[in-house]
Image (spheres, helix red, strand yellow):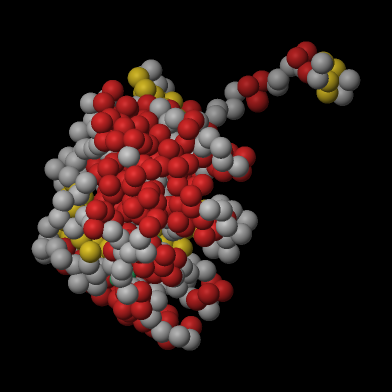
Amino acid sequence: MLKLNGMPIDSIETPDYIKKLPSIYSILFPEGYEILPNTTELFELEFAFYEQSIISKEEIIKRGAFFKSVDGKLTNHYIICSNNSPLIWEGRSEITQAYFKEGNFSTGYASHGLFPYRGKFHPQLIKGILNVLKLQPGDVVLDPMCGSGTLNVEASTIGINSIGVEKSPFCVLMSRVKYESLKVSNTTLSDIINNQNKSYKILIKNKRLPKEFEFTNIFDPEKTITLLAFFDAMGYARRCAKSIDVLFPKVIKRYVAQITSFVEARDKLSLKIAKARFELGDAKSLPIDNDSIDGIITSPPYSFAIDYAENDRPQLEYLDYDITSLKDGMVGLKGKARKEKLDNYFEDMDKVLSEMARVLKIGKYAVIIIGSNDIQTGGIRLEKKIAEIAINHSFVLDQKIIKPIKGIQNTMKDEYILFFRKEGS
Ligand SMILES: C[S@@+](CC[C@H](N)C(=O)[O-])C[C@H]1O[C@@H](n2cnc3c(N)ncnc32)[C@H](O)[C@@H]1O
């Protein structure tokens, strides 16, 4: 029996004033709203509060990112995430399993878990931002530096059309696979498993992308999902010094389990996946018409914190791309000394923001997520500098939310979510 000061704990009376203290949840949310498990961080509560204040109960059930249920009815987000198959984390280290379980409602659902792209968005947060921006089915949202396509996946599952532009051809492939995976049939998933040995033999035998796997015009989901799993196993083998022969079957099994979990939920909820288009292009000269976009959500490189081309070298080489010329066009990778790199970075970001202002409709929002590492930038705060540049391109900063970055190894402690509105008459 638990005791406190020698008294059984059950027999201790809670003083009245403590009984009367309201919980933070009851202050933030009216009765009937049940928040998702593990929603404890301040930025999550902020977004949950905004969702509840901005969109209707019906919309929270269909597209909310932070609630488990409203008036007893489970939300689609909860249903999609709780359908995750344990096969997704089977056979992985305890640390990885714990990471997956903790991220069940925030990162590990739909097709986000395919290929662990460094520097990717927090998917649940993106859904929350789409809700705060009140984007509606039929609207078009853009990520001009789409990386692994997180925005496109999130937008598609709640009926919003999207465009992803990326400089790296590997990222264009990855984004497209993550998006196309949302639409696959069970037959395609069985074919992936049935043909995995045959596919692997072709892929491993070649040093460059074999003809059978080319995807320029016709996008074959079976082949491209298999190819992404092969690339994932290739990167994994490089990191953990295990043989790709051993890793590939595990990765492909996990991919199929992950996609199956989503497909089951998709069919149960009769979700319609909206359209998404991906372009190999440059955020400094977007292949998009003036005043045509209803919202932008993006996260540019945080100056030169990550060398995205070097990171994906094995995959880019397999796809037969020249990494040196790719680096020339990528934001954050030009120059040698710190000052030169930073000058080039801000010059490029000026062009990116000018393009974002050109394609966005007046009165609509561009949300930029950016972190700053003082040591790397010599004390310059990127979020401040980006806001200064944005203001020169007819943007007004309406809101700023801070999101802490977890992990003791990170020297960057916070990310800033900056809401810029395009001004004009
Ligand atoms: C922080 S990551 C974006 C991650 C993305 N939000 C996601 O969820 O996966 C920044 C991306 O910008 C891309 N990039 C860098 N320079 C670019 C340019 N000039 N045009 C388009 N994309 C670029 C990089 O390849 C990288 O994928």
Q: Where is residue 350? Give x, y as percent.
A: 29, 75
Q: Please give the name of the residue rendered at 36% of the width and 68% of the height, measured from the top-left corner.
A: 317
Task: State the image coordinates of residue 338 (x, y, percent, origin top left).
Answer: 48, 83
Q: Quadrant of residue 273?
A: top left
Q: Where does the C terminus fall, quadrant-wise? A: bottom left
Counting every numbered tag in the picture gives: 0
> Residue 136 location in percent, x, y?
19, 41
Nearest the eye: 174 or 23: 174
| Residue 200 can be seen in this image | yes
The image shows residue 358, relative to residue 254, as above or below, that is below
- Relative to 278, is 134 above or below? above
When the figure is inspected, residue 125 is found, relative to residue 320, above or below; the finding is above
Front residue of this view, candidates 304 and 14: 304
Residue at 48% across, 28% down: 26
- Residue drawn at (45%, 52%), measured in percent from left and top? 233
Note whether residue 135 is visible: no
Q: Where ligand 1 lies, by quadrant?
A: bottom left
Q: How far across and how far down the image is residue 355, in percent? A: 21, 69
Q: Residue at x 43, y 31 (%)?
A: 84
Query: Which quarter of the picture shows residue 316?
Result: bottom left
Q: Looking at this view, is 59 or 244 the one in front? A: 244
In the rendered image, the vertical position of residue 262 relative to residue 282, given as above or below:
above
Task: Assign the N terminus to one quadrant of the image.
Answer: top right
- Single out the residue that lies furthest toward the top: 11
* Left or right of 285 on screen, residue 20: right
Among the 4 quarters of the image, the one containing residue 189: top left
